[in-house]
Amino acid sequence: VGMTAIVHAANGALKVALMGRHADRAVALKLGLPAVLAAFPGAWLLLQLTKPAPLVTFTLAGAPREVTAAKLVIAAAMLAFAWLELSQRLERATLPPRWLPLGGVLSGFFGGLTGHQGALRTAFLLHAGLDKRQLVATGALIALAVDVSRLAVYSGRLAAVSASEHGPLLGAAVASAAVGALVGSRLLEKVTLRGIQRAVAVLLVLVALGLASGLV
């Protein structure tokens, strides 16, 4: 989750650089400030979940596998957010702008805990009177702030990560995210939010099943 946060932060920084001028600063402050504050306890809780011993360990294809409490919590959250993406219940809900701080608290907490903040954040931003570019830019600005906040909590664990072992993978992920951000900024007017939601939901389910089974 910590390494993924680095990718998210780098991608978010690029998105803000590309589209930040379109962000609605007032909306970003109302939702973003509570999100940043809530990200800290969410990230702290994740660190506590990584301390207990694995619940299940086994070997598959000669490689050790394990199921941990942290993996199960993250998998459950991913499945829940996948369901929210597909069901569109949050989008159909009436969420007036005065609820933006609540949206910030919820999205920030889960952003710190599992990294999944987009569905909740977008659901509240959709009712804030923003056009498509403002929605994407404001969301990117808030996401970057949350990622920087949770990285501050994860930093102790990340310091122990071997740069030589994980550096190439992390670099490739950051580069791929950058390419995606550049392509996405050009195709923003040609794609539908619903299509993106479906693709994200399918990927969330696949990764969640991998985590819960110990394969990932």
Image (cartoon, helix red, strand yellow):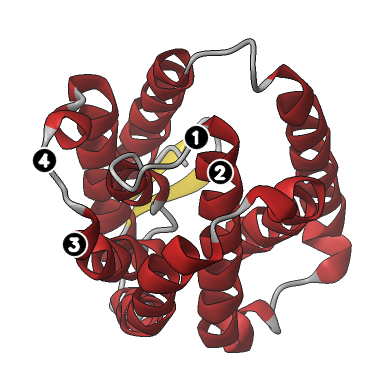
Image position of 11 with respect to 53: above or below: above
Image position of 195 with respect to 34: above or below: above
Could you tell me if the residues under marks 4 and 3 are in contact, i.e. CB atoms within 8 Å?
A: no
- Among the 4 quarters of the image, the one containing residue 85: top left
For the question of whether residue 124 can be seen, the reply is: yes
**Residue drawn at x 74%, y 30% as measured from the top left:** 185
Q: Which residue is mark 2?
A: 134
Q: Does label 4 or label 3 sit earlier along the sequence?
A: 4
Q: Amino acid at mark 3?
A: Trp
Which numbered marker is on residue 94?
4
Q: Amino acid at mark 1?
A: Asp
Local SS, label 3: helix
Closest to the observer, 176 or 54:
176
**Residue drawn at x 15%, y 29% as measured from the top left:** 92
Could you tell me if the residues under marks 2 and 1 are in contact, i.e. CB atoms within 8 Å?
A: yes
Residue 48 vs residue 160: left or right? left
Q: Does label 1 or label 3 sit earlier along the sequence?
A: 3
